[in-house]
Image (spheres, helix red, strand yellow):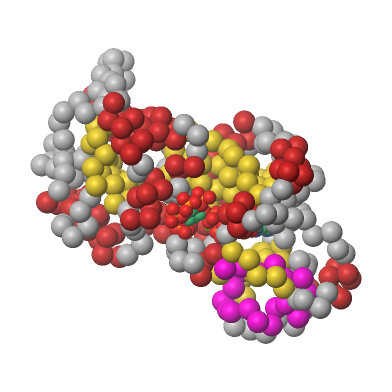
Amino acid sequence: MASNSPSSNRLRVGYAFPPNKERNVIRPSLIDYANLHGVDLVRIDLQTPLLHQGPFHCIIHKLYDNAWAENLQDFASKNPDVVIVDRPDLISQLYNRVSMLDVVSQVKVSDSGVRIEVPKQVVVKDEAIDSMRDLELKFPVIAKPLESDGSAKSHEMSLVFNQRGLKDLDTPVLLQEFVNHGGVMFKVYVAGDQSVCVKRKSLPDVAETEEELEKKAEGAMKFSQISRAVEKSEKCNGEEKKEEEEIEMPPEKIVTEVSRGLKEAMGIRLFNYDMIRDWNSTYYVIDINYLPGFAVLPEYEPFLTKFFKEVAQKKVEEAEDSAIGDDKAKPRCCCFQ
Ligand SMILES: O=P(O)(O)O[C@@H]1[C@@H](OP(=O)(O)O)[C@H](OP(=O)(O)O)[C@H](O)[C@H](OP(=O)(O)O)[C@H]1OP(=O)(O)O
Ligand SMILES: Nc1ncnc2c1ncn2[C@@H]1O[C@H](COP(=O)(O)OP(=O)(O)O)[C@@H](O)[C@H]1O
Ligand SMILES: [Mg+2]
Ligand SMILES: [Mg+2]
């Protein structure tokens, strides 16, 4: 076992986050719960090389800079027994709004009547858009920045109703068809094999026909982080709350299968995704976020603690499997109770 690997039965999980992220993930309630269940959460000092810290069984992180990725890579190559959740090169597929959704086509669900898709979308670089028909898109569309890098700018979007609304867009931009979905989206939080689906307020449906949209004087409407904005505003009145409650949750099987499909296709284990459903019961995945603020989930403490234990247990099993070759009959030892 390499020098930085721990040996005790307690599980040591190192974490590396900016301060705001730390507040949204590593709450005192998680530290206490995990501690009671044999898991020690250890803050990684970003001013000190990782190789001088530890020991760790596992490291979780959300930092966007290359220096961190190199620091982690160097550490991982010298400490193959430490589980890195997740590999920076795999996480980076989520930093671009096109590559983040590429994996959705690989997701398979067992109910043949259900479709899992991505809304039609096109990247516009710097060319003028003469007609949406050339792009094979229909208004309304959402204009999204290509980057999804944690910056405020990466959340600044526009709902574009007609040609006039296209002229002020910064390029490059992703134009994605707006899908009517009843004003409610599903946010699914994934940690390894576990997934939890919650409802969130979303943009309301656009009822106008293309001809009616063409006449709208205001060509576009800017918005940012709508689920938070709507929750904070007075618009979230009793009637809207009731409408939200009436929207049926997706079947648990769909949530589990989509979560597993995305996890396997991306090779990453801590994320959430936004999913909407149209009136034909087609589901659209519209956004995938690496390591979001899990603390909003009810029961988030056991959720993450269980995940840490599973990750460590899988590593032990892998090591046993490689040590005993094909002799799988041997009983497994369970180290992290
Ligand atoms: O702020 P939180 O805790 O709600 O989490 C944000 C996420 O909100 P959610 O939990 O999905 O409702 C948020 O999800 P959305 O993009 O808003 O769907 C992002 O994941 C955000 O990270 P970043 O700004 O893209 O790096 C997340 O922000 P960070 O916690 O990473 O700063
Ligand atoms: N194609 C779409 N059709 C309908 N609503 C959408 C679509 N794409 C995004 N939205 C709405 O816009 C919000 C923000 O878009 P999203 O891609 O999730 O960006 P962010 O990363 O800022 O959360 C979504 O939560 C949803 O309410
Ligand atoms: Mg989103
Ligand atoms: Mg997002």
Where on the image, by quarter, is ligand 2? bottom right
Question: In the drawing, does residue 116 fall left or right of residue 38?
Answer: right
| Residue 115, placed above or below residue 65 | above
Q: Is residue 23 visible?
A: yes
| Residue 253, placed above or below residue 128 | above
Q: Residue 278, percent across and down?
A: 76, 48
Q: How many marks?
A: 0
Question: In the drawing, does residue 196 fall left or right of residue 44?
Answer: right
Question: In the drawing, does residue 4 fall left or right of residue 235?
Answer: left
Residue drawn at x 62%, y 31% as measured from the top left: 252
Q: Quadrant of residue 280?
A: top right
Q: Quadrant of residue 69?
A: bottom left
Give the quadrant of the N terminus.
top left
Query: Is 173 covered by the magenta stretch?
Result: yes
Residue drawn at x 41%, y 59% as measured from the top left: 92
Query: Is 59 covered by the magenta stretch?
Result: no
27 and 151: which is toward the camera: 27
13 and 35: which is toward the camera: 35
Residue drawn at x 37%, y 49% as measured from the top left: 23
Residue drawn at x 31%, y 36% as measured from the top left: 31
Q: Residue 67, percent across and down?
A: 26, 64
Q: Quadrant of residue 65?
A: bottom left
Residue numbers of the magenta segment: 156-174
Q: Residue 337, percent across and down?
A: 29, 21
